[in-house]
Image (spheres, rainbow, N blue to C red):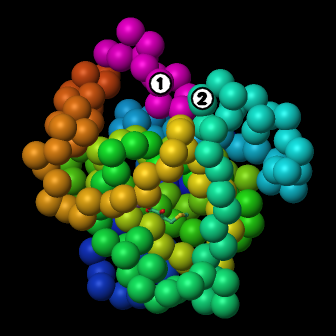
Amino acid sequence: MGIEAWYMDSSDEDQRKPHKLVPNQPVSMDQLGELGVFYSKLNADVYETDPELEQIRKDQGYSHMDIITIHKDTLPNYEEKLKMFFEEHLHLDNEIRYILDGQAYFDIRDKGDRWIRIAISKGDLITLPAGIYHRFTLDETNYTKAMRLFVGEPVWKAYNRPADDFEVREKYVASLTAAHNTKWTPYNQRVE
Ligand code: KMT
Ligand code: NI
């Protein structure tokens, strides 16, 4: 169980297409976990009153939340924003997204700098760790609605690659070499 992820082909075709290799090279939840990416499934139909979501927000300190509807009729500067989301970037904080409706892709770099595409859809709560290079795109349905969660005052600033000298990047890279003998729990919290 979980989300579907795979290594991407290198074609320049429409970013909204799946870009699977032939034959497909799937990526498991364990492999995602080793990269610091975590996932949970919730019932998005009840997100407004969901005690499970409340508990996660409390436990993880996700005090801030807002909702972004990514569709040409709802998102101001739609084309420009989509272009920005698809630039390879990192953040100083975890990127936590809960998909309330529709579907989309997050692409992340693996340890060897290969692109992994993660398909996310309604009910998926995904956390990308601070310092990971990634990008986001809609798929061919051209619509997703997502809750953005954050610890404290939200900072959405993205730093486009190259950002290798950032402390957060160095820490993330260091965490990868340590990952095989470090136990991870959901939501990217380390247990020493
Ligand atoms: C980001 O930083 O990659 C984004 O915020 C993507 C859009 S939110 C689903
Ligand atoms: Ni991002």
Q: Nearer the viewer, residue 51 or 12?
A: 51
The number of numbered badges drawn on the structure is: 2
Q: Is mark 2 within 8 Å of ligand 1?
A: no
Q: Residues within 10 Å of mark 1 (few under 14, many from 20)?
A: few
Q: Image height check: is 19 above or below 165?
A: below
Which kind of residue does numbered mark 2 sit on? Gln
Q: Is residue 71 magenta?
A: no
In the rendered image, which quarter is residue 10 located in? bottom left
**Residue extending furthest toward the left:** 165
Quadrant location, the C terminus: top left
Q: Image height check: is 159 above or below 180?
A: below
Residue 21 coordinates in the image, percent (x, y): 38, 69
Label 1's element? strand
Q: Residues within 10 Å of mark 2 (few under 14, many from 20)?
A: some
Query: Is residue 121 found left or right of 105 in the rendered image?
Result: right
Name the disc covering residue 54, or none: none
Q: Is residue 184 magenta?
A: yes
Name the disc covering residue 189, or none: 1
Q: Nearer the viewer, residue 182 or 147?
A: 147
Q: Image height check: is 167 above or below 134?
A: above
Which kind of residue does numbered mark 1 sit on? Gln
Residue highlighted by disc 2:
60
Q: Nearer the viewer, residue 16 or 173?
A: 173
Range drawn in magenta: 181-192
* Alpha carbons under labels 1 and 2: distance apart: 9 Å
Mark 1 or mark 2: whose residue is earlier in sequence: 2
Residue 99 coordinates in the image, percent (x, y): 67, 58
**Residue extending furthest toward the top:** 192
Q: Residue at x 65, y 24 (%)?
A: 59
**Residue extending furthest toward the front:** 153
